[in-house]
Image: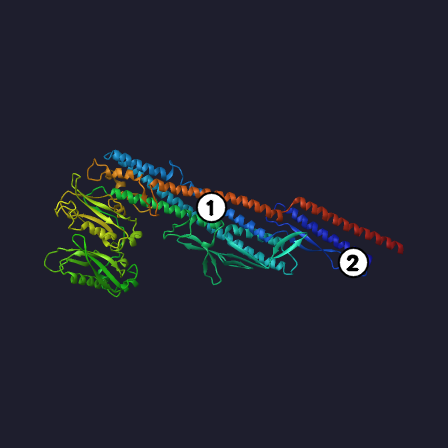
């Protein structure tokens, strides 16, 4: 070979080491860049010249510049970062919520509950003191205001979370578009199969990590290959690339699918736009991420008013509503003991009014027109016939067809009653827009003397349900549709004279799951009150019992006790284990049925002097005040199945929240430890070590100098050679 070949060989070494120095210089300059992955040059020999006695090398080249990284280690690094960010986000909101639910006795709602019952204690001691009544009204309003404020705070936090989810979706979509653009650039840059788009991949990794922190995506890279770079194993370069969310692709190579917002009663849920432009709801698939944490706090299932059913906010909403509803129901039930001349409850359900112009229209057509709540079906209507002692004599069966009109149904019922007993003197009619079974001169003898009453045992046609006349349906079926819920048990009806003496007393049974409509329907309860031939006083006098002084009935969803005589009598409930008085709002102290609308009764708010401490109509009587005072110490049933005192229930709510905050904080601290460990491992591989780079710089510098010396030596040899020729 010519002497110039050695010059070329040294030149390749000079060039290769210059490139190695350039790469090292780039590593050192990015030493503080957390998104930079250190690079290494791969030296390889050039193809030798085949000579005898052996091959002669012609130099060196840089065959590749590799990123020193590991895809699987990076995935662990990104996943732990996402988990940590999720817990940080969750902790931030939980701690904010926790400030409104302090787990101490002398702050917040707990204190207001104490003040409320203390005001009742003062009232029980001074039942005729007007200033004490005003204080009780004020403490009650303070309590209800706190309920309202807590609900509003939770609503504000939910609104803030929705806004943050909206912002993070926008950020995620920007990242998704940028990743797709990077994929396109990487593909072009590496199209020759030799070049590595290292810094583009650094940018993509940083975006991947941030995307995982925002939303729970999965990243798939196919065709991954391992490369050895001076003893370092790298697992990095891949051919195929896809990111999915909830199983749906959001990035597929260079194409993207937008993450979209789905409105759920004013709340932001998460969707992915599919190829057919439909949206897949992936909200339930999002777990460990910032959005996942926001969803966990806010909830993913909602009521019609937009309030969440689940999540931390949903659980607190439910607890507040349950606490308020239980307080309303129990206080009102006791307050209904306070006797009054006549009583009228609140509207607990709203029937569909039957106007004359729809009475002859087939039920099936009324359902199609949207007049009825739902379809009526062909079925058997069963009516229990009761005598005047309240005993069941027989059950009538009427075949109802959905092609019948309401008038047809009434005719069928009345024909069946007449066939049973033409002197029964009860008729089914439309009265005040509702179907009622009323006393009627069925035989035309000029007298109305009902032999008993009728109760709906089973509405096989669902007609009463379609008309929303809940009084005839099973309490087990309609209880959840009432503003507050009844409980198994019973109550007493007391009739007092003007001096507060009990003139008549009748016990009423409530059994939600009974198959006997006397005890398991609203109309059955009303019928117990009105049953005639019951000797309440056991004095063999048929004219001084509860039904002789008052008549109970349902009108427009309201329970009404109407006076039947001119005597100075008063009516009140007592020993109400079913919470009948509270559910139907007989003589309300509280209005409302949840934490958002609980309030002191309007008439008592306007005139606190009307607040009564008595049960019997006697100003010196404080029995009602004492019973409400004792309510704070009694274990009562809550709608969620709990059995606890009011204070125990609220304390459990705050304790559960405090435990959730502590648990989240502990998990966050553990996640921080794990993240630190994995990030150290990750950066020990990918991060720039200045000492190591300086060693490499020294090595490459010496290599460069050595090759330069070779060139100088060859140059001197050439000079000597040319000198000989001269």
Of 114 and 610, the residue lying toward us: 114
On the rendered structure, is 185 left or right of 486?
A: right
On the rendered structure, is 123 left or right of 81?
A: left
> Residue 124: x, y in percent?
26, 35
Picture colour scheme: rainbow
Residue at the (60%, 54%) spot, across then down: 201
Residue at the (27%, 58%) spot, across then down: 465
The residue sitting at the bottom extreme is: 403
Looking at the rendered image, the quarter that the N terminus falls into is bottom right
> Residue 669: x, y in percent?
51, 43
Nearest to the eye among marks 2 and 1: give it: 2
The crowd level at tag 1 (other Cα within 10 Å; few <14, some 14-19, many 20+) is many
Name the disc covering residue 56, or none. 2
Q: Is residue 534 visible?
A: yes
> Residue 327: x, y in percent?
31, 43
Residue 619, quarter of picture: top left
Residues under labels 2 and 1: Cα distance?
67 Å
The crowd level at tag 2 (other Cα within 10 Å; few <14, some 14-19, many 20+) is few
> Residue 78: x, y in percent?
55, 50
Looking at the rendered image, the quarter that the C terminus falls into is bottom right
Circle 2: element type: loop
Residue 400, quarter of picture: bottom left
First in sequence: mark 2 vs mark 1: 2
On the rendered structure, is 550 left or right of 585?
A: left
> Which residue position holds label 1?
90
Circle 1: element type: helix
Name the disc covering residue 625, or none. none
Of 417 and 696, the residue lying toward us: 417
């Amino acid at each position: 070979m010519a002497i110039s070949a050695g010059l070329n060989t040294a030149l390749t070494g000079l060039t290769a080491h210059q490139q190695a120095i350039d790469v090292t210089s780039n590593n050192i300059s990015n030493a503080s860049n957390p998104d930079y992955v250190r690079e290494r040059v791969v030296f390889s020999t050039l193809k030798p010249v085949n000579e005898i006695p052996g091959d002669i090398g012609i130099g060196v080249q840089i065959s590749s510049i590799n990123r020193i990284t590991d895809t699987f280690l990076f995935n662990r690094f990104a996943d732990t970062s996402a988990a940590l960010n999720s817990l940080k986000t969750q902790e931030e909101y939980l701690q904010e919520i926790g400030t409104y639910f302090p787990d101490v006795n002398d702050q917040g709602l707990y204190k207001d509950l104490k003040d409320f019952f203390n005001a009742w204690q003062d009232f029980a001691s001074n039942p005729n003191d007007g200033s004490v009544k005003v204080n009780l009204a004020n403490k009650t309003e303070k309590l209800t205001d706190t309920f309202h404020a807590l609900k509003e705070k939770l609503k504000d936090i939910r609104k803030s979370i929705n806004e943050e989810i909206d912002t993070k979706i926008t950020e995620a979509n920007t990242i998704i578009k940028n990743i797709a653009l990077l994929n396109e650039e990487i593909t072009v840059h590496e199209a020759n199969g030799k070049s590595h788009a290292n810094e583009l991949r650094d940018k993509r990794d940083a975006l991947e990590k941030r995307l995982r922190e925002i939303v729970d995506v999965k990243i798939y890279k196919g065709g991954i290959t391992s490369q050895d770079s001076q003893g370092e194993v790298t697992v990095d370069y891949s051919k195929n690339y896809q990111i999915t969310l909830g199983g749906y692709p959001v990035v597929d190579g260079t194409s993207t699918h937008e993450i979209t917002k789905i409105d759920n009663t004013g709340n932001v849920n998460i969707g992915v736009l599919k190829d057919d432009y439909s949206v897949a709801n992936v909200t339930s698939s999002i777990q460990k991420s910032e959005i996942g944490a926001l969803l966990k706090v806010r909830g993913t299932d909602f009521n019609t008013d937009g309030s969440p059913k689940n999540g931390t906010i949903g659980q607190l909403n439910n607890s507040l509503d349950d606490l308020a509803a239980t307080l309303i129901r129990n206080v009102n039930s006791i307050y209904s003991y306070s006797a009054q001349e006549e009583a009228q409850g609140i509207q607990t359900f709203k029937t569909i009014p039957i106007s004359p112009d729809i009475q002859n229209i087939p039920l099936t057509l009324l359902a199609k027109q949207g007049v009825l709540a739902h379809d009526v079906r062909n079925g058997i209507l069963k009516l229990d016939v009761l005598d005047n002692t309240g005993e069941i004599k027989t059950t009538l069966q009427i075949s109802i067809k959905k092609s019948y009109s309401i008038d047809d149904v009434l005719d069928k019922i009345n024909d069946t009653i007449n066939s049973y007993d033409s002197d029964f003197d009860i008729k089914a009619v439309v009265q005040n827009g509702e179907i009622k079974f009323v006393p009627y001169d069925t035989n035309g003898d000029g007298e109305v003397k009902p032999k008993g009453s009728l109760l709906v045992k089973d509405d096989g046609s669902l007609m009463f349900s379609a008309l929303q006349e809940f009084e005839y349906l099973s309490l087990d079926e309609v209880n959840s549709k009432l503003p507050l819920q009844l409980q198994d048990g019973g109550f007493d009806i007391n009739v007092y004279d003007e001096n507060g003496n009990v003139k008549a007393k009748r016990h009423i049974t409530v059994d939600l799951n009974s198959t006997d409509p006397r005890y398991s329907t609203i109309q059955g309860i009303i019928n117990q009150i009105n049953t005639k031939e019951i000797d309440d006083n056991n004095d063999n006098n048929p004219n001084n019992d509860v039904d002789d002084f008052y008549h109970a009935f349902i009108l427009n969803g309201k329970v009404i006790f109407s006076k039947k005589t001119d005597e100075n009598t008063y009516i009140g409930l007592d020993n109400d284990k079913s919470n009948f008085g509270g559910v139907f709002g007989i003589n309300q102290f509280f209005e409302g049925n949840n934490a958002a609308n609980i309030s002191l009764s309007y008439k008592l708010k306007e005139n606190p002097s009307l607040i009564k401490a008595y049960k019997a109509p006697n100003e010196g009587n404080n029995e009602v005040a004492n019973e409400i005072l004792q309510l704070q110490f009694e274990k009562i049933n809550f709608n969620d199945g709990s059995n606890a005192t009011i204070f125990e229930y609220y304390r459990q709510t705050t304790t559960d929240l405090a435990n959730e905050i502590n648990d989240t904080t502990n998990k966050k601290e553990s996640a921080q430890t794990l993240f630190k460990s994995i990030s150290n491992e990750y950066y020990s591989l990918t991060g720039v070590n200045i000492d190591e780079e300086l060693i490499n710089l020294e090595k490459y510098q010496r290599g460069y100098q050595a090759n330069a010396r070779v060139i100088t030596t060859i140059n001197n040899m050439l000079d000597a050679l040319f000198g000989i020729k001269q």
